[in-house]
Amino acid sequence: MNAELLLGDEAVAWGAIDSGIGGAFSYAGTPATEILETIQIVAPHIWSKWSANEKVAYEEALGMSYAGKRALVSMKHVGLNVAADPFMSSALTGAVGGIVLAVGDDPGMHSSQNEQDSRVLAEFAKIPVFEPCNQQECYDMTRTAFALSEQYGLPVMIRLVTRLAHSRSTVRLRPDDERNRSRTRLPLPDPNDWALVPVNARRRYRRLLGLQGDLIAESERSLYNQLTIRGRRGIICAGIAWNYVRESLGPDPEDSLLRIGQYPIPVGLIRQMVDHCDEIIVVEDGYPVIEQHLTGMLGVPGKSIRGRLDGTLPADGELLPEIVARALGVPVDLPIHADAIVAGRPPQYCKGCPHANSMNALIDATSGYEQPLLFSDIGCYALGIMPPYRSVHSAVDMGASIGMAHGASRAGAFPVLCTIGDSTFAHSGMTPLLGAVLNDANITVLILDNSTTAMTGAQDSMASGEQLMELVKGLGVKHLQLIEPLPKNHETNVAAIKEAIAHEGLSVIVARRPCIQIKPRKLAAKLPQVEA
């Protein structure tokens, strides 16, 4: 075995490589972006291109699984909402080549619009989940997940959180003959199993239900689920929370401990702890998934169950070692805060960002109106909500800006404008624009074309430059203008936006100037390459 210093994301990528995947599929989203990027860098012989969105990525991975090869699909937690349709149905179709879904959850919302817990969706779909506590387990669990996927013919989820995805530790790799799987295909499945018309879907759903007992049994005997019976206080911890508990209690605690790293929840192990302990504290980074199952609606008679639900741990936000220590009754020394050398400041556009020029033009073009509605989307340009711009009134989800603007216009609002990036437009902006075209919505759409997916690290955009212009025309847009967001063009751009507002019906402006952060990647020199 050889050792590498890896991020949690990178460890998942290596686990997939050493499992012999035929391909990796993703749409960039923090904290999961580095998974696909690592495969692109260290294993260029493996198919690993960015997909148009998370739904497409999941469907591409599912197609590879159907054809008998292993596939990795990765995304952030809100991206799983986009992929929910094929994800839920794939639990019924099952898997042929192993399919592993790596999801980066973001407790504390470091770079996300919510902190939803992907374990809930996995439970909804009734599929197995692995939740690593360190980078070594990110690698090992990925290897195990592919084997489990093929054993039961189901997709399997790996759930990471930001703190694990973006921290480094030494990982021991164990490449072996499984890499050769990428050169072979398993037999094709029965088409009836993958065609979810009602008669087949009902049969496949009964199969899925019938597997649940076996999946629980797998969790009961999993090496990633460990029970130690000692004191009358029991602590159940999941994933990265295991590290915080160990740090708080030391190497030889008096408490009974149950560490959960594989789901479905191991009911038998929890029953043993409940039978022995008078008080149980549940420590999990994310929603109180385990805690809610344990308490049910009425709790456990004669037992004290504590965690996020009763305020022992905060109901929201990311867990930290000091938070866990206080919950466990361990004295915590407050950290010493030195005087800041650099004053804190809110996030803002990069110096010279084209979006700043676009927002300045938008502000001046709408300044004569009493209450313009300015919808926006997910991307760097959402920073327009900050002073001095205040040019963003909404940022809800990928692709929402155009549909929300259309809806507001039908409520009689005027003027209604929306901003959306080129990559977000390709992700999920074309469909609402098509609706706005067919209904000639009285809105102005500004597509901010900076030639890249800037917010997540300057990945390639699927619709930029002249290709974007042709795409917009192909959707039926008649009133289309191109502007260059530069300070010297400010008055011209303001006039173009005013003209678009005055146009009765749908108008689209493409503001085209490349992101100033686009530059050659230097990461390749830092990571070893895997030979084909």
Image (cartoon, grey):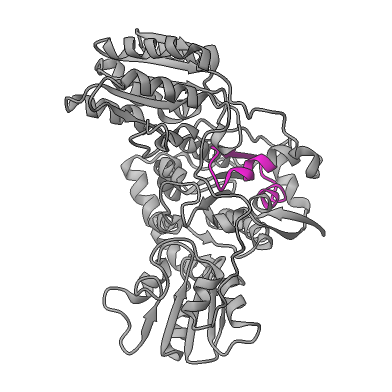
Q: Quadrant of residue 333?
A: bottom right
Position above or below: 373 against 238: above
- How far from the left and from the top, in percent, is residue 313? 42, 72
**Residue 398 appears in the figure:** yes
Q: Quadrant of residue 472?
A: top left
- How far from the left and from the top, in percent, is residue 426? 47, 26
Residue 169 belongs to magenta span: no
Magenta segment boundaries in residue numbering = 13-38
Q: Which residue occupies the extreme left position in the image?
A: 412
Residue 18 belongs to magenta span: yes
Q: Quadrant of residue 208?
A: bottom left
**Residue 530 appears in the figure:** no
**Left or right position of 390 against 175:** left
Image quarter (top left, top right, bottom left or bottom right) of the C terminus: top right
Residue pictured at 52% horizontal, 54% vertical: 157
Closest to the observer: 493 or 177? Answer: 493
Closest to the observer: 282 or 447? Answer: 447
- How far from the left and from the top, in percent, is residue 531? 81, 40
**Left or right position of 409 against 360:** left
**Left or right position of 68 against 42:** left
Image quarter (top left, top right, bottom left or bottom right) of the N terminus: bottom right
**Left or right position of 20 against 218:** right
Closest to the observer: 180 or 247? Answer: 247
Closest to the observer: 254 or 39? Answer: 254
Q: How many marks?
A: 0
- How far from the left and from the top, in percent, is residue 176? 78, 54
Residue pictured at 54% horizontal, 49% vertical: 344
Position above or below: 529 against 329: above
